[in-house]
Amino acid sequence: MSAPDGVPLAARVPTPSARHAVGHAAEPVVVAGLVPLSTCDWPGRLVATVFLQGCPWSCTYCHNPGLIDPRTPGSVAWAHVRDLLARRHGLLDGVVFSGGEPTRQAGLVDAVREVREAGFGVGLHTAGAYPRRLAQVLPWVDWVGLDVKAPPGRYAEITGVPASARLALRSLRLVLDAGVPVQVRTTVDPTVLTSDDVAELTALLEGMGVRDHVLQEVRSTGTRPAYAEALAAARS
């Protein structure tokens, strides 16, 4: 998952070759990167953003393909996140868990609870790939940025996973029913989506009760070379 500002993770944290890989046997989550201060990952809040490793989908426009493989070891110790938060009391409003797909990791619930118990708000970026784990973590979450990528009939063309539309919409329903503030974001991929597709999705979301739906322009920065070429061709 890319950050809401469209800047790939590789441009916001040190590259893997410049970071010290850490073991994560005792870590609650596998952390791929940490942004100590962000003004754009949770609208209206000053936050630290924790990027978790691993994602089950391989989206066409993924800005952080290095975060997909769940076997990649963590590069930021959770103890470093704890230390940052201990030093930022009164300066940060909260912590955003992003990815990758943060709900892929079983330890997310423990990590989120720890952050809340330390006195910080919790934001979550998710594409909704794991509804059951999302349901477990929602009681501890104050805000959700949920990526809904396409109308159901076009979903798999973006994610590469046939069941992805069902999972994403189930997750959206969970968030809406829980009453957690949510911003739904759609990165408009012109290599897949037409204006009619976008209109269909907008109508679907409105019908579900979504009140905050943001359309994002796709960017080629950080994407795979083949996609960057396809995007350039679609825009020419």
Image: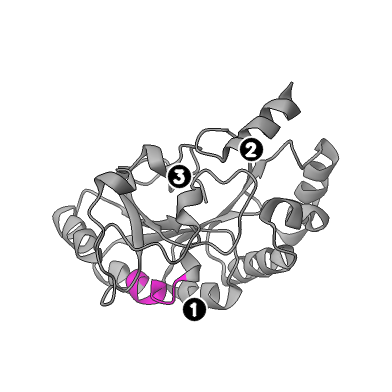
What coloring was used for the rendering? one colour
Q: Which mark is residue 136?
A: 1
Q: Which mark is residue 226?
A: 2
* Residue 49 placement (x, y as % from top left): 35, 52
x 29%, y 43%: residue: 14
Name the kind of residue labelled 2 in the image.
Ala
Horizontal side of residue 155 vs 64, given as left or right: right
Name the kind of residue labelled 3 in the image.
Pro
* Residue 125 placement (x, y as % from top left): 49, 56
- Magenta residues span 105-112
Under circle 3, the secondary element is: loop
In space, the residues marked 1 and 2 are separated at their CA atoms by: 37 Å
Q: On the image, numbered disc 3 is attached to which residue?
A: 43
Query: To which quarter of the image does residue 190 belong?
Result: top right
Name the kind of residue labelled 1 in the image.
Gln
* Residue 77 placement (x, y as % from top left): 24, 62
x 74%, y 57%: residue: 156
Q: Looking at the image, is 20 positioned above or below residue 226?
A: below
Q: Looking at the image, is 162 positioned above or below residue 231?
A: below
Q: Is residue 57 magenta?
A: no
In the foreground, 190 or 203: 190
Mark 2: few, some, or many residues within 10 Å (few <14, many ≥20)?
few
In the foreground, 125 or 42: 125
Q: Nearer the viewer, mark 3 or mark 1?
A: 1
Q: Main secondary structure of the magenta part?
A: helix
Q: Is residue 107 magenta?
A: yes
Whether label 3 touches label 1, CB < 8 Å: no
x 47%, y 45%: residue: 3
Counting residues from the start of the chain, the first of labels 3 and 1 encountered is 3
Counting residues from the start of the chain, the first of labels 1 and 2 encountered is 1
